[in-house]
Image (cartoon, grey):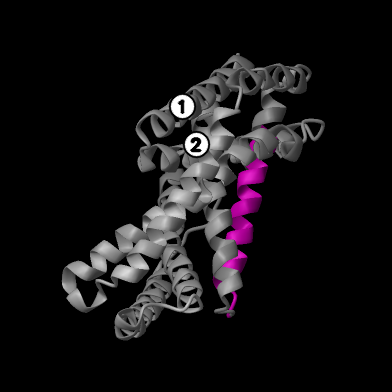
Amino acid sequence: MYKKIVLDYFNARVAGLEQFCSLALERKEPEGIHQLRVENKRLKAFFCLLESINPALEAKKYFSGFRQLSKSGAAERDAFVQLELLNELTADNRELELPGYREFIRQLEETGWNVFQQTAAAIKFQDFYKKAEAIDRALRNVTQKRAESRAMRRFEAMCNLLAGLKSSRSAADQVFHQIRIVSKEAYFTYQIIQNCFSSYIEEEGKEPALFLKQTHQLLGRWHDCEICRSCLKEYWASPPKISDQPGLEAMRGIILERKERLKEEFIKLDPEFKAPFRSVHRMS
């Protein structure tokens, strides 16, 4: 029974991916690319979880096609987020209008669109759906109890990793990037287990799941500031329009201040990194 639930979950994710890809291509809709990339991150967590259940199903191998599609939309998505951030900042400070920088970001967005369209147009979603056959084979001789135990152990291990990173005294950006990436995958892993093995989730699981969501959303905004710094640096090297230079300095200061504030907000979060599955210990 659990195998059908797992396969249905996978097919639903691919169907969502196909829908968002069509939305992006037909309407040139940035939200389509965003949702497509989110769906791909769920699928990455899905394949990594399956690999923990049966190592014969190599996550890197079976996720490769999905990864190619997701990466093709990265530049467009980053540029779109930067335009949104610029709009937000200029609403409060007209000095930050920066027409030259705005045009620079729009050109990055257009280039990103072209890359995404070329890649997405060549994707055959039927090949993605066929990966269900490999999933079925990988789970064929794995009992439900064994699958559940290994899935929950993986989630517990991710929580333990995050707890260690969170409690470390390092404030290096590299550590925050690692926490952002792992917390997002851990949250999606939690959702997958919730959908495929829901009878084993206890009420106490809600608090860790909420922390994981808060963490990856907060550090996602922090990462947007990192991308903004990179874009500002690239534009400054172009070199920028003289009229933009005072505003660029002001914007750089605002972004650095925001980045530090978001980091402090994250540090104040109080995680409860106990595995939300009592059955982990019962079945180990």
State the residue position of label 1: 16
Residue 119 appears left or right of 229? right
What residue is at 30 percent from the left and 65 percent from the top? 86
Q: Main secondary structure of the magenta part?
A: helix
Tell me the quadrant of the picture where the N terminus can be found.
top right
What residue is at 46 percent from the left and 69 percent from the top? 231
What residue is at 40 percent from the left and 61 percent from the top? 105
- Res 39 label: 2
**Residue 99 percent across, percent down from the top left:** 29, 69
Query: Which amino acid does the dot numbered 2 rest on?
Result: Glu
**Residue 96 percent across, percent down from the top left:** 26, 75
Residue 86 appears left or right of 190? left
Where disc 1 sits, the SS reads helix
Query: Which amino acid does the dot numbered 1 rest on?
Result: Gly
- Residue 152 part of the magenta segment: yes
* Residue range (magenta): 149-169
Tell me the quadrant of the picture where the C terminus can be found.
top right
- Residue 156 part of the magenta segment: yes
| Crowding at mark 2 (Cα within 10 Å: few <14, some 14-19, many 20+) | many
